[in-house]
Image (tube, rainbow, N blue to C red):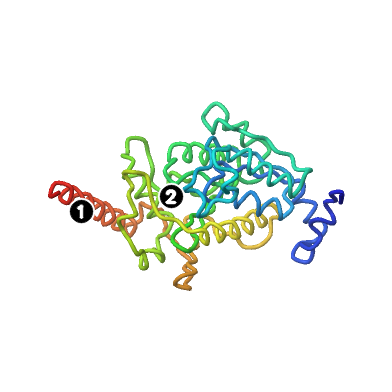
Amino acid sequence: MTEFDYATAFKRTIGWVTPAELNRLRQARVAIAGLGGVGGSHLLTLARLGIGGFSLSDYDQFELHNLNRQAGATMDSLGRSKLDVLQEQALAINPELSVATFPGGIDADNVDAFLDGADVYVDGLDFFAFETRRLVFARAAALGIPAVTAAPLGMGVALLSFDPEGLSFDDYFDLRSGLSDEELAVRFMVGLAPARLHMHYLADPSAVDLAAQRGPSTPMACELCAGVIGTEVLKVVLNRGPIRWAPHGLHFDAYTQRMARTWRPGGNRNPLQRLMIRIALRRLAAMRNDHQAAQAGR
């Protein structure tokens, strides 16, 4: 059996990084909350990049409907903890990894322990986990930790990176306590992708149901997200290469073969964003009324 050797396992990365930079990646720690749609792909990509330490959190198990997109989801892993499965896969890539696990999820009591020693926080939480996401982004900023999120939208990826000394997550998305789940979802969705490159080829709008916390997904988008996140983490850890901090963003859509660099000063408080939010809420209300009328007519 071949013994593991870090220098040999990751030597093909040399050239795009220097040997000294590869050693820096080996010393780095990345915190990832959520190992479902994109989080598992993030973990495996970063493990292959040579990142040496991870703090991981997920309390969910794999289900049949995860097979279309989630790293680690197979017929053999159904019913198993996502955290256990993905940790095993990461350790199979690099058995020398330092891994801290948080199987109960992240809350106010353990968020600081989860972020302890992290060079960067990577968001892999479920789209609708608004309160947990707000908590982790806020604590990352308070602790001086850059935070990045890449949303799998259609067949593309929307990237936002948050400088702990810059515009905060809550300020960019204009989030606060007291908003309804629907309002939170719309603000998050509109803020993630101001260019809306993915909206023009949605084949079945009825598949989007914010009230039921359900939306369509593709494996291509998840893998694109992992590639973008891997690159962004590399730049943060090695302190090289351009980083476009929020309110700047990036949206690439493979289906339309378009890329947009977005800039929304003030985030969702920007007049254009406010208009988009109002339009989205009206469309959702219209869809809800149409559905109720169809149900009543049966």
Q: Are marks 2 and 1 in contact (CB under 8 Å)?
A: no
* Residue at the spot of label 2: 172
Answer with the quarter of the image where residue 21 lies.
bottom right
Question: Residue at position x 21%, y 50% from top?
Answer: 291
- 87 over 25 or under it: above or below: above
Q: Outermost residue, top direction? A: 109
Q: Outermost residue, front direction? A: 75
Residue 183: x %, y % from top left:
32, 45
Judge by depth and name the residue closer to the eye, 150 or 170: 150
Residue 139: x %, y % from top left:
54, 37
Distance between the Cα atoms at labels 2 and 1?
A: 27 Å
Binning the other alpha carbons within 10 Å of mark 2 as few (below 14), some (14 to 19) or many (20 upward) gives: many
In front of the other: label 2 or label 1?
Answer: 1
Q: Outermost residue, bottom direction? A: 257
Locate residue 158 relative to residue 44 in the image: left or right: left
- 105 over 164 or under it: above or below: above
Question: Residue at position x 20%, y 53% from top?
Answer: 286
Locate residue 21 relative to residue 244 in the image: left or right: right
Question: Residue at position x 56%, y 45% from top?
Answer: 164
Binning the other alpha carbons within 10 Å of mark 1 as few (below 14), some (14 to 19) or many (20 upward) gives: few
Judge by depth and name the residue closer to the eye, 203 or 55: 203
Specify the amino acid type for callout 2. Answer: Tyr
Specify the amino acid type for callout 1. Answer: Ala
Q: Mark number for residue 286?
A: 1
Q: Mark number for residue 269?
A: none
For marks 2 and 1 on the same chain, the one whose residue lies earlier in the sequence: 2
